[in-house]
């Protein structure tokens, strides 16, 4: 199984081309190809992860590599795959969510424009993400990385008839591309320090201390720039909420499995590089700590159900980043794993609601509990899972992160950072439960406020909800604290230490989450028209406007470059650079005329006529610049050559 | 087959001219025959070049192969010396293929005033000049091929162009010619300082010039300046690029394609083939300045593209930026950088060729080149054309998996670690700025797509049933699109050829 793991990304990639070529002729118009492909990938992923479950992961890790092409003095770039516990977990996450999203989309996208193309793009998205995951070297990873970016552009802008949607698509691509620049440079820095792009070789060089601390710090901080972009961390988080412009299944895929997890995956993949530099780790932790709270605050006041979830994703990814920053790599990936299921569920549930209510705004919802019982029940499970209520999946992973952060505060190299992450994480946990309960109340409880006639979605949509609901309950059990060969040991890079549970912290976590839920429920139980949080006054306004960061970027960066700097450059181009050319031509013409009369006609003309074929050939057509004088001009030039050549040989 | 190896390059270079003459003597009324002759002439050259590719000894890509070396103008020691190595070969093949595709496209589409006879004859003549440039190993021969391309292109723009065609044609002609003057001066200086190891006289032979020590550095620098001016105008490098948007903007479609895909590469190729090996010490002195101009070109091209309203001028400015990456690669004087440069030349050739084809075909339908007049909503009116435009634009912005990526990323990688003796911090600054340029590049291409392709068809175009991509367009474009994917997935198609020759060259700089 492992030696054929390359099929896992290749099948969805092939499905992309097959759907484009044949999709429209098939009975379902395309989805069947993508679903079959990703199903096989999924089955293979199960086969691979089975080797890592219950075993010490590092022993089963494999790497296969082959030459790809030479790029300088015989040095070859490799293409290959790196299969370890982390790869296996990511395979499961990506293929599971992608499979369920594709099935769901058959119902959700029914009758929508570019139906077949949509499924082709989903397959490309999946295949690109799996390429990123399987890559054994950084340039190959970059390929998957950027392909994921363009897929997000294509899918976010799926409804490109509306300008807002294509704006969101461009924003997603350009913002993440901005992070890709430091990412690329980070790869170069690491390459300069280790002379390799191969990840295992980099591990080795770092482990034996071949690479200077300064190089590792620089590389890690630059690489993290890419992660900030892809995983929507502050200050490059702005694209992620706008990415809601895409069809809701795309949002589920982006937010749970493909795209945003790439940044977390990158840091986890190159963790030895980060771990070698406390400075870099602290940066990761602090960016994570800040972003989780920042995004949770914004999530509290959004009325668009998808935007609540989007900011929630930013916040939860920040949890993972912060966990990586305090050295808790396994906890971070564990949260990535559980989060994928309940976040996909939340988005697909939101999609189901939007499908029924014909609106994204929770102001137009309410009372959907009875009308959409399956959506309601599964959404509730996901809400509890995200809030961190035991025994749902999110509780286990979130608790592990908080425990690890606290432990880092006690024993880590930079105590204060561990405590900061813990405190921010605890506050965020409370806020998370609050805003999720707010969304839940506004959507499902109370009276229906909209004007549509909501009804439960078809089975092809609720089926995936139920499966994800089940996963949101059980996915956390693989990582119960104290479990000897639990989740952490599957992907441990070296010896895995089994940490015992800290019951005091567990109680605190549960109290915070429960408190948030209760408060959210009390405040929003009677929600009708006015959001109670508006009582916060100006702060509410700041939150609604997302701290004005989008406006700032538009005013300070995008518009000046797009509208002013570019036009000024073009003006200089036309009037200064090109003006100089036209001016020189005019001067040449004048002096050429003079020379022509005085020197050329009398002295050199006879000699030149033989050479002047080209000049004569062009002679008649001149109007604009030279008004018929090209022959003279060329003659002048050739005369110049002869004179200069003579001078040159004389004096040089 | 030994005969083939001896004759093949001459055939690739001169068969098109033979057919151009045949076309010239064909009666005007026989348009079908003219088209057919053009197809055969360019097709034959392409087939022979592909056989050359097949027979090329990949293990010896650094050595000159398919050599023809005959006495030519005895009095000045100029020889009829043509040959190719792994650097020339991809460019030669690209030339013959793209010329053929242009001829295919022109079977059905020739801009006013028509006149297929002159049109095809000029394209074939151009083919001789371009392919000759990539295989000539004698400076005189090289110079003749180099200049030969000017005349047909001049007429293509001046007769079949649009809007300010005369102005653009003359500007193109005179600007390039001015550069050539300095280049020729450099050639002459090299000649008079050289000693032919065989005859004891002077030599124009590139291979023999490469081993010479031309006395002092001032001489080398001065000659390099002459060559630089000639080559840099052709590339064109910033700030010598202002003829390009005019020439491209107003050239007929296949003129723009040939100009962008092939003729620009003559300049970058000449740097690699002539300036670097013959004047290595001067090259090292000039490299930081060339790298600086290249970096400016990347940003300048992107910013000007961002401000463009005319689709053809936008693509022209995008070429300035892309050629900036090529020159940045060359200026590092490293194997990675020059591999990247040759790869970038081929990638730019297929991608930008594709973009100019598209711009031309869009113009044929809308009769305007203004982005805001054509768009929005072209995807609705012409879904296949729009889709191919999106594909090509995304390729041009450097998406991995497609051809545009490798030239850029390897050029940036090479700038991270330039050749010994070059300032690392300076080139790293270039690298960062170049990388920022990739963001701007993505920006203007996606913005172009948004304004042109996306959105709803405006009222003014409603009810106009434009023909979507036609069969002849598919025929001409399919090989380019396949190449864009193939080169992206397997860059070794180029770098396997170039690496040997490039690595041999860059030994001079370590």
Image (cartoon, rainbow, N blue to C red):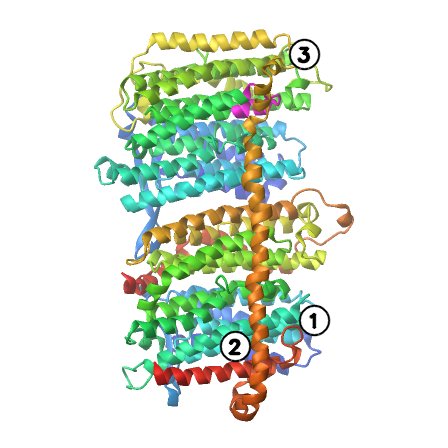
Name the mark nearer the viewer: 2 or 3: 3
The verdict on a common chain for dots 3 and 1 is: no
Name the mark nearer the viewer: 1 or 2: 2
The verdict on a common chain for dots 1 and 2 is: yes
Name the mark nearer the viewer: 3 or 1: 3
Q: Position of residue B277 (x, y in %)?
A: 33, 69
Quarter of the figure with the C terminus of chain A: bottom left
Q: Chain of mark 2?
A: B
Instruction: Name the outermost residue toward the left.
Output: A208
Residue named by callout 1 = B114
Residue B159 as seen in the image, left or right of residue B293: right
Residue named by callout 3 = A528
Please check the rendered image and state whether residue A476 is part of the magenta-colored stretch, yes or no: no
Q: Position of residue B84 (x, y in %)?
A: 39, 70
Q: Give the extent of the magenta segment.
A: A299-311
Measured in 3D between alpha carbons, the distance from the residue under mark 1 to the one under mark 2, in whole angstroms, is 23 Å
Residue named by callout 2 = B148
Q: Earlier in the sequence, mark 1 or mark 2?
A: 1
Residue B23 as seen in the image, left or right of residue B145: right
């Amino acid at each position: 199984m492992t030696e054929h793991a390359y099929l896992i990304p290749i099948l969805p990639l092939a499905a992309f081309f097959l759907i484009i070529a044949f999709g429209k002729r098939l009975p379902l118009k395309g989805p069947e190809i993508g679903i079959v492909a990703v199903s096989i990938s999924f089955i293979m992923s199960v086969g691979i992860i089975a080797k890592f479950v219950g075993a010490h992961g590092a022993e089963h890790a494999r790497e296969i590599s082959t030459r790809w092409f030479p790029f300088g003095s015989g040095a070859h770039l490799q293409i290959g795959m790196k299969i370890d516990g982390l790869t296996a977990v990511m395979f499961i996450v990506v293929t599971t969510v992608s499979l369920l999203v594709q099935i769901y989309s058959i119902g959700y996208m029914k009758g929508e424009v570019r139906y077949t193309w949509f499924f082709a793009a989903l397959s490309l998205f999946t295949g690109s993400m799996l390429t990123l995951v399987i890559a054994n070297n950084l340039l190959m990873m970059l390929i998957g990385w950027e392909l994921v970016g363009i897929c997000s552009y294509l899918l976010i802008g799926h409804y490109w008839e509306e300008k807002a949607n294509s704006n969101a698509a461009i924003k997603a691509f350009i913002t993440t591309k901005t992070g890709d620049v430091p990412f690329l440079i980070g790869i170069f820095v690491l390459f300069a320090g280790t002379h390799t792009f191969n990840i295992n070789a980099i591990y080795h060089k770092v482990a034996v201390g071949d690479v200077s601390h300064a190089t590792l710090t620089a590389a890690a901080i630059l690489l993290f720039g890419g992660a900030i972009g892809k995983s929507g961390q502050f200050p490059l988080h702005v694209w992620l909420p706008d990415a809601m412009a895409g069809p809701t299944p795309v949002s589920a895929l982006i937010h749970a499995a493909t795209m945003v997890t790439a940044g977390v995956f990158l840091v986890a993949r190159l963790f030895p590089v980060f771990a070698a530099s406390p400075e870099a780790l602290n940066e990761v932790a602090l960016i994570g700590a800040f972003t989780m709270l920042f995004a949770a605050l914004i999530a509290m006041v959004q009325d668009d159900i998808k935007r609540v979830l989007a900011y929630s994703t930013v916040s939860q990814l920040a949890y993972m980043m912060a966990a990586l920053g305090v050295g808790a790599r396994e906890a971070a990936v564990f949260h990535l794993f559980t989060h994928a299921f309940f976040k996909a569920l939340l988005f697909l549930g939101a999609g189901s609601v939007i499908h029924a209510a014909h609106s994204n705004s929770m102001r137009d919802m309410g009372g959907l509990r009875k009308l959409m019982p399956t959506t309601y029940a599964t959404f509730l499970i996901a809400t509890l899972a995200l809030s961190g209520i035991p025994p749902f999946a999110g509780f286990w992973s979130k608790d592990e992160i908080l425990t690890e952060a606290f432990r880092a505060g006690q024993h880590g190299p930079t105590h204060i950072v561990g405590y900061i992450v813990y405190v921010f994480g605890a506050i965020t946990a409370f806020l998370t439960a609050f805003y999720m309960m707010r969304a839940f109340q506004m959507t499902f409880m109370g009276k229906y406020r909209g004007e549509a006639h909501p009804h439960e979605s078809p089975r092809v949509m609720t089926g995936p909800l139920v499966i994800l609901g089940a996963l949101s309950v059980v996915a956390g059990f693989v990582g119960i604290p104290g479990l000897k060969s639990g989740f952490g040991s599957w992907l441990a890079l070296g010896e895995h230490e089994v940490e015992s549970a800290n019951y005091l912290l567990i109680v605190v976590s549960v109290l915070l989450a429960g408190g948030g839920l209760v408060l959210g429920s009390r405040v929003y139980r009677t929600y009708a028209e006015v959001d109670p949080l508006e009582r916060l006054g100006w702060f509410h306004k700041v939150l609604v406007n997302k701290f004005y960061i989008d406006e700032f970027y538009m005013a300070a960066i995008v518009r000046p470059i797009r509208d002013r700097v570019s036009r000024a450059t073009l003006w200089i181009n036309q009037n200064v650079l090109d003006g100089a050319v036209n001016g020189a031509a005019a001067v040449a013409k004048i002096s050429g005329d003079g020379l022509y009369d005085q020197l050329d006609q009398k002295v050199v003309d006879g000699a030149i006529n033989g050479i002047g074929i080209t000049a004569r050939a062009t002679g008649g057509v001149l109007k604009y610049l030279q008004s018929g004088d090209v022959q003279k001009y060329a003659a002048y030039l050739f005369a110049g050559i002869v004179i200069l050549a003579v001078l040159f040989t004389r004096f040089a | 087959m030994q005969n083939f190896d001896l004759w093949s390059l001459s055939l690739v270079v001169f068969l098109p001219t033979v057919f151009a003459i045949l076309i010239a003597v064909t009666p005007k009324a026989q348009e079908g025959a003219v088209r057919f002759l053009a197809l055969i002439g360019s097709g034959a050259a392409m087939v022979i070049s592909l056989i050359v590719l097949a027979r090329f000894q990949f293990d010896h890509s650094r050595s000159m192969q398919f050599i023809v070396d005959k006495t030519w103008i005895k009095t000045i020691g100029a020889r009829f010396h043509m040959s190719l190595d792994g650097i020339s070969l991809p460019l030669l093949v690209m030339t013959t293929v793209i010329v053929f595709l242009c001829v295919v496209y022109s079977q059905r589409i020739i801009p006013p005033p028509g006149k297929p006879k002159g049109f095809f004859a000029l394209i074939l003549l151009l083919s001789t000049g371009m392919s000759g440039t990539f295989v000539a190993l004698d400076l005189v021969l090289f110079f003749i091929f180099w200049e030969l391309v000017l005349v047909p292109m001049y007429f293509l723009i001046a007769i079949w162009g649009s809007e300010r065609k005369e102005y653009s044609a003359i500007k193109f002609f005179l600007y390039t010619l001015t550069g050539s003057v300095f280049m020729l001066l450099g050639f002459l200086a090299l000649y008079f300082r050289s000693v032919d190891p065989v005859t004891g006289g002077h030599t124009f032979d590139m291979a023999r010039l490469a081993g010479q020590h031309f006395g002092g550095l001032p001489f080398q620098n001065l000659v390099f300046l002459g060559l630089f001016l000639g080559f840099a105008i052709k590339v064109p490098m910033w700030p010598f690029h202002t003829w390009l948007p005019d020439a491209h903007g107003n050239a007929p479609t296949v003129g723009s394609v040939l100009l962008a895909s092939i003729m620009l590469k003559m300049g970058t190729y000449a740097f690699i083939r002539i300036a670097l090996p013959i004047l290595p010490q001067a090259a090292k002195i000039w490299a930081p300045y060339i790298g600086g101009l290249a970096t400016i070109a990347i940003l300048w091209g992107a910013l000007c593209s961002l401000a463009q309203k005319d689709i053809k001028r936008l693509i022209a400015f995008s070429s300035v930026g892309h050629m900036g990456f090529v020159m940045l690669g060359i200026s590092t004087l490293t194997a990675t950088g020059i591999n990247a440069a040759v790869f970038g030349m081929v990638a730019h050739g297929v991608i930008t060729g594709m973009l100019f084809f598209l711009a031309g075909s869009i113009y044929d339908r809308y009769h305007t080149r203004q982005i805001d007049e054509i768009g929005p909503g072209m995807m609705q009116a012409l879904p296949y054309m729009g889709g191919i435009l999106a594909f090509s634009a995304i390729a041009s912005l450097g998406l991995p998996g497609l051809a545009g990526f490798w030239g850029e990323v390897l050029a940036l990688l090479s700038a991270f670690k330039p050749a010994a003796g070059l300032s690392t911090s300076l080139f790293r600054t270039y690298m960062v700025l170049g990388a920022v340029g990739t963001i701007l590049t993505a920006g203007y291409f996606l913005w172009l797509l948004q304004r042109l392709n996306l959105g709803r068809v405006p009222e003014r175009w409603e009810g106009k049933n434009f023909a979507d991509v036609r069969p002849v367009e598919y025929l001409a474009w399919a090989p380019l699109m396949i190449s864009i994917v193939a080169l992206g997935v397997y860059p070794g198609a180029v770098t396997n050829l170039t690496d040997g020759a490039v690595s041999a060259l860059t030994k001079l700089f370590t």
